[in-house]
């Protein structure tokens, strides 16, 4: 019997993946303990989103392993991974704009296979996390502000009671003050042991809430640090822009 | 011709022998029933080949072959009944009539694009009875034209046997022409166009004109088939040119293989002979054709031709279109000197709906330099490439190539001026070898007339030789000589990217636009690519590189432009860009205010934001 308490919630080991024969992620390893936030950073095209998609089962794992709660899920189908406790909030607040907040949340509870009344009490859990949404439960989601829509998207994912939440650029398209709001909500989610993988372009905002920082470049890990050790920008700058460029001429 | 070609000469002996047997069938003891079946197969084969050319090769579904067939038949029948019974005259008239109908349907159908050609040609078939009704007695009405006189040739009556021979010879001659059209750079160009019209225009093919040409030429065999058919029974009626026949032609094409010459004969033979075996077939014909179409469309995309082709290639010497082997003239790592052209983009703006994809972008790319274009997702890099290649129209500003404004030119014209490009997803038509794909870049150069291709005049062979030599040079340079005869579409991604670069080089690119050419390459492939790009730069080509791979950009570029939200936010050498504050800001996702802020204050602000009560948060957002 594996001692599950000692193994991290999620372990990504030498992951290689991509789209068809286009390889985007070459060699990525990191782990997420329960209750921790791992920020996955890097320039565009670095392979962050593709890594999340591979963990969710949307992209085929070409090489390496993904271990979740001690089980190798590399070959598991997406819907089984979701039922196993993985949730992915994709970039761009993909919610149903013409449905109410409540309906959107209920839809997220689908994998639980429970009735309307119990869904309603699950939704209350989300309203406690995001009080802003409680007042707007019957409002059509499309009328909400960008930040609130992002909360609906996160709430929808949380309805299925995941143990791992993956967020792809939750701050994208939001005003700086709203980014802070969303980030603080994200950091409050880990209290009950939820593990989070956070992909962000807004580097400082992500570092401010993360426990660990992993920077990718061209599908490989170029920096892995405790967030507390990333106390100035220089170290990230180096990871992003390289230290010693040697333009040939 | 080279020795290799002479050695593989006898490929055409097989079809030639087949044709000879068919021609002499009546003299070999074939009775009237057999010869009639043969003639009907010949006629149907020609109609099917017409569909193969426009759909299988040019990628444009057109169902109007039966209508053109009817036109050919009525022209011949009318002429015959009015005393013009010369075979050559009737064939010429039928062919011209077919060309005219092809143009009349093709011009509007292809102008509108999308499904309009399929729809307009489809309705053409449906209205045949109405047209015949309108013209009424002059062409026999619904009862048809009976007693069409037999042919004469130069004043001599043709007997039954000679008529038979003439019909088979005309059909065989068309198939020779058809084969010559598709087994040529023109045929390869059609396949590229079928794969992707965007790709086709990027190598200088005018998609509209080429499709129209293919469709119009494809009408001719259908019209000729109509003329030939009048001699089979001496009787035609509107019911002959039914919608069922249109479906049967489609079934024959799918069954035999749409992208095949001999598949047309094969499919037509099956369809002609199959109904004889089942007496009650007619009743269920539509259903059975439908099932055929579904089964073959799904299971056997290439029809019987696809199944048999590998065996034919193995057993018939030279059946595979031969690639003339040429020893690479260029040493790897050196590209023959060519003069790049300066590309000057001045205050270019482009809008999609209300969103500005590009907002006053200016850049200049010089010959013998690598100019890189980087920026976050959605910053407008690819939009700019597409504007330069003529796929998007700019809403403001100018794009000049060596001082000449090109922003209002169509894509194929820009390609012909010397701007070549690669695509984020390299696309290669199935069935083309690496050599053919690279040579397709030369489509717009030294173009031999289609006539010289059809009948294989010396001009055709000279161009073909030059194409093969250029392709071999480029493949040698790229280190891809080993893949020359392999199917390009089945090569690994990294190799396909190089093949795309090769296609652009073969096109004689003076400006080379590379769209994420390094993505998906492993480290060895990246190094190889970097070497190739250095050689291309050293040769004097203007290289524009859109790329995510920062390291490669820093290594290769002379000048880097950084785009963000449709604007150029920084220009400079790799070192300048690496240390540029603006660039850092964009990539690290910071707003201008953030730069002066510490991590601690951001966390405080986050806390403050959640302390707000819901109502106020709402107002704020």
Image (cartoon, helix red, strand yellow):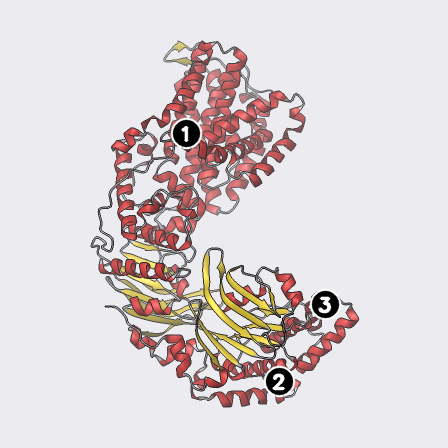
Q: Tag 2: Cα neighbours inside 10 Å, few (<14), some, or many (≥20)?
A: some
Residue with the mark numbered 1: B315
Percent x, y of residue B201: 38, 50
| Chain for numbered disc 3 | A
Looking at this rendering, what residue extends furthest in the left direction?
A: B337
Q: Nearer the viewer, mark 1 or mark 2?
A: 1
Q: Name the residue under label 3.
A: A112
Mark 1 to mark 2: distance in Å? 78 Å
Seen from the viewer's position, the closer of residues B442 and A43 is A43
User: What is the crowding at mark 3: few (fewer than 14 residues within 10 Å), some, or many (at least 20)?
Assistant: few
The answer to whether marks 1 and 3 mark residues whose Cβ atoms lie closer than 8 Å is no
Q: Position of residue B118 (x, y in %)?
A: 53, 40
The residue that label 2 is drawn on is: B617
Q: In which quadrant of the rendered image does the C terminus of chain B lie? A: bottom right
Q: Are marks 3 and 2 in contact (CB under 8 Å)?
A: no
Viewer-nearest of labels 3 and 2? 3
- Earlier sequence position, callout 1 versus callout 2: 1
Quick check: do tags 1 and 2 share a chain?
yes
Q: Quadrant of the N terminus of chain B?
A: top left
Mark 2: which secondary structure? helix
* Other-residue count near label 1 (Cα within 10 Å), few / some / many at <14 / 14–19 / ≥20: few
Residue in the picture at 41% in, 16% down: B86
Of the residues tagged 1 and 3, which is closer to the observer?
1
Q: Quadrant of residue B538?
A: bottom left
In the shown orientation, is residue B543 left or right of residue B102? left
């Amino acid at each position: 019997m594996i001692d599950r308490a000692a193994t991290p919630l999620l372990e990504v080991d030498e992951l290689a993946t991509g789209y068809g024969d286009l390889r985007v992620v070459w060699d990525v390893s990191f782990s997420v303990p329960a209750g921790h936030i791992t920020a996955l950073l890097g320039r565009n095209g670095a392979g962050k989103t593709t890594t999340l998609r591979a963990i969710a089962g949307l992209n085929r794992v070409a090489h390496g392993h993904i271990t979740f709660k001690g089980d190798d899920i590399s070959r598991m189908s997406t819907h089984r991974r979701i039922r196993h406790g993985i949730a992915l909030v994709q970039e761009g607040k993909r919610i149903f704009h013409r449905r109410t907040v409540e309906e959107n949340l209920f839809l997220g509870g689908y994998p639980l296979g429970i009735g309307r009344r119990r869904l309603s009490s699950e939704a209350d859990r989300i309203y406690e996390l995001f009080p802003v949404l409680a007042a707007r439960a019957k409002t059509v989601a499309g009328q909400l502000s960008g930040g609130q829509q992002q909360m609906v998207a996160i709430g929808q994912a949380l309805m299925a009671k995941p143990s791992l939440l993956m967020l792809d650029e939750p701050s994208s398209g939001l005003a700086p003050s709203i980014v802070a709001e969303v980030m603080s909500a994200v950091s409050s989610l880990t209290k009950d042991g939820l593990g989070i993988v956070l992909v962000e372009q807004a580097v400082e905002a992500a570092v401010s809430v993360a426990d660990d920082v992993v920077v990718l470049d061209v599908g490989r890990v170029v920096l892995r640090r405790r967030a507390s050790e990333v106390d100035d920008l220089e170290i990230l700058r180096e990871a992003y822009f390289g230290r010693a460029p040697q333009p040939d001429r | 011709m080279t020795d290799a070609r002479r050695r593989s000469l006898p490929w055409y002996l097989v079809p030639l022998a087949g044709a000879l047997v068919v021609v002499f069938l009546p003299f070999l003891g074939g009775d009237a029933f057999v010869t009639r079946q043969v003639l009907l197969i010949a006629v149907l084969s020609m109609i099917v080949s017409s569909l193969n050319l426009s759909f299988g090769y040019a990628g444009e579904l057109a169902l109007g072959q039966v209508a053109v067939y009817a036109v050919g038949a009525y022209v011949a029948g009318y002429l015959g009944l009015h005393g013009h019974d010369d075979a050559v005259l009737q064939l010429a008239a039928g062919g011209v009539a077919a060309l005219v109908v092809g143009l009349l349907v093709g011009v509007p159908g292809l102008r509108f694009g999308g499904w309009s050609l399929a729809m307009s040609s489809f309705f053409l078939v449906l209205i045949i009875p109405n047209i015949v009704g309108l013209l009424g007695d002059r062409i026999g009405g619904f009862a048809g034209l009976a007693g069409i006189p037999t042919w004469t040739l130069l004043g001599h009556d043709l007997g039954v046997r000679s008529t038979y021979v003439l019909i088979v010879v005309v059909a065989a001659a068309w198939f020779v022409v058809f084969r010559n059209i598709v087994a040529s750079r023109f045929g390869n160009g059609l396949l590229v166009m079928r794969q992707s019209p965007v790709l086709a225009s990027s190598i200088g093919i005018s998609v509209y004109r080429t499709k129209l040409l293919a469709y119009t030429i494809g009408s001719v065999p259908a019209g000729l088939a109509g003329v030939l058919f009048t001699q089979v029974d001496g009787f035609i009626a509107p019911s002959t040119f039914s919608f069922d026949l249109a479906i049967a032609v489609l079934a024959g094409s799918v069954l035999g293989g749409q992208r095949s010459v001999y598949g047309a004969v094969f499919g037509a033979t099956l369809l002609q002979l199959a109904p004889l075996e089942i007496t009650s077939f007619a009743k269920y014909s539509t259903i059975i054709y439908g099932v055929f179409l579904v089964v073959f469309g799904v299971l056997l995309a290439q029809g019987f031709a696809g199944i048999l082709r590998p065996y034919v290639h193995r057993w018939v010497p030279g059946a595979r279109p031969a690639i003339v082997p040429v020893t690479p003239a260029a040493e790897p790592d050196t590209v023959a000197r060519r003069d790049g052209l300066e590309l000057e983009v001045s205050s270019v703006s482009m809008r999609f709906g209300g969103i500005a994809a590009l907002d006053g972008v200016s850049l200049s790319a010089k010959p013998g330099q690598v100019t890189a274009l980087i920026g976050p997702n959605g910053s407008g890099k690819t939009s700019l490439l597409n504007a330069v290649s003529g796929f998007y129209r700019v809403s403001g500003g100018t794009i000049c190539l060596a001082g000449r404004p090109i922003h209002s030119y169509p894509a194929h014209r820009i390609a012909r001026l010397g701007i070549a490009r690669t695509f984020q997803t390299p696309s290669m038509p199935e069935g083309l070898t690496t050599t053919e794909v690279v040579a397709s870049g030369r489509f717009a150069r030294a173009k031999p007339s289609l006539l010289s291709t059809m009948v294989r005049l010396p001009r055709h062979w000279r161009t073909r030789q030059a194409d093969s030599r250029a392709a071999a040079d480029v493949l040698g340079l790229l280190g891809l000589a080993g893949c020359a005869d392999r199917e390009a579409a089945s090569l690994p991604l990294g190799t396909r990217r190089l093949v795309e670069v090769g296609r652009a080089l073969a096109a004689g690119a003076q400006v080379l636009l590379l769209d994420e050419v390094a993505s998906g390459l492993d480290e060895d492939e990246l190094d190889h690519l970097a070497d190739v790009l250095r050689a291309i730069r050293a040769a004097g080509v203007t290289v524009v590189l859109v790329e995510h791979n920062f390291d490669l950009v820093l290594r290769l570029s002379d000048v880097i432009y950084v785009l963000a939200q449709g604007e150029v936010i920084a220009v400079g050498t790799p070192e300048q860009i690496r240390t540029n504050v603006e660039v850092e800001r964009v990539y690290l996702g910071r707003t201008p205010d953030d730069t002066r802020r510490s991590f601690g204050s951001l966390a405080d602000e986050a806390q403050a934001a959640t302390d707000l009560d819901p109502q106020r948060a709402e107002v704020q957002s």
